[in-house]
Amino acid sequence: MDMQKYDVVIIGAGPAGSSLAYMLAEAGIKVCVLDKKNFPRRKVCAGGLPARIIDLIPFDIKNVLINDIREVSLTHNLQREFCKQYNKTLLYTIDREKFDNFLLSKAVESGAVLMEGVAIESISSDKGQQFKLETAKGDFSSNIIVGADGANSFTAKSVGLDPIDNRHVAIQAKVPIENIPKQYKEKIALDWGFMKDGYGWLFPNGSYVSIGVMGPQLSGLAVKSYFDEWLTRFGLKPNECEVEAHTIPHRITKRPITSSKALLIGDAAGLADYWTGEGIYYAIKSAQIAGRQINKFLQGDKKALDNYEDIINEEILLELKTSYSFSKLFNHISLPVFKNLRKYHYPWNIFCRIMSGERTFLDIKKRLRPDILLSKIFFKSKRNH
């Protein structure tokens, strides 16, 4: 077979890979995206998008949004349930199969070449000048390769990168919505306090709900026990549910995510929030950063690819590190936080702003200065600023 040549080859057609392919194709760059699966493909995911993602994606995604969530049911250690509302969208729920396929279709419409059902067998480079990708369906060459192939990235391993500091494991089931108590059909349910560095969720997604838990990968048995109890709380029998699991990767130190002209984005780079496990926002944001730097490089800026990692560290890693720090603190104060959320409007408002993306963990960290905290405690007029 003839060698297929491209400016950029992207390995992985999830939200990160598709977003990058769209951006490069729009810029007139010859780009190919490869994925070992055929689309639409099933994807294990809770199916929640933070509201701020609407402003990040450069085209309308309303047709693939299912629920506009403004109400949350909260429990602590599966007890003390209360419900509260917010006056703005906290998050949207999606079907990942349809969402991912939609993003990929936008990339193809813009001119990106899609190769589905193509598993890469090896990646090699010619002294950093050209990459060669061997597959059973032919070989590809490219000036630049981008790993968007998830938490267990083959690309990362092939180019000698190991960006992941630690992982969570998530266990979930998709349950027909008619099997769930009716009060949970239009709101999400969250639980914390059962185990450190973990929480439970229930997200309605049209005809079904995604229900699951997340916890440290090394605590797999405890996570499974939590999952069974969380299901039971909603009247479900664990042995009657089709259960799926996946890992959530976290990069919280400056581990390399570039090697010569190879870049990692999204989960392949470990860009998932430690506290919440959310990764789609950072997948798309990292893809857009990569797209800008690749475009600059191909236009003659030889330092652009090297600068990609520095930009990720400044615009994403600082937030992920702060989330990690808050998560560790939260392990010790989860019950007082829960009680304050239930009783007072101000902490509930902060919680909602973080969930929706109106505020970041970095914002909250800056506002934890003693003088700012005291002013908010004693002066009501300053509590919403």
Image (cartoon, rainbow, N blue to C red):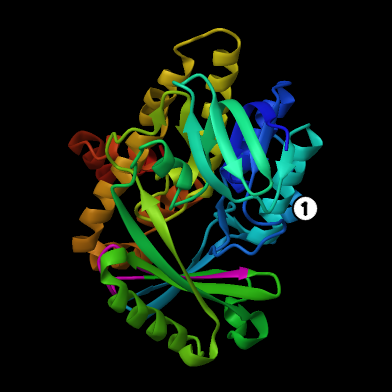
User: Does residue 195 show up magenta in the picture?
Assistant: yes
- For the point 28% across and 39% down, the residue is 365
Is residue 61 visible in this depiction of the protein? Answer: no
In magenta, the rendered stretch is: 192-204
Quarter occupied by residue 246: bottom left
User: Which residue is at the front of the view, 277 or 41?
Assistant: 41
**Is label 1 in a helix, a strand or a loop?**
helix
Toward the right, the furthest residue is: 109
Instruction: List x then y, in percent, for residue 300.
Output: 56, 7
- 9 or 230: nearer the viewer: 9
Farthest residue toward the front? 1
Q: Is residue 264 visible?
A: yes
Which quarter shows the C terminus?
Answer: top left
- Residue at the spot of label 1: 63
Question: Amino acid type of disc 1?
Answer: Asn
Q: Residue at x 40, y 45 (%)?
A: 270
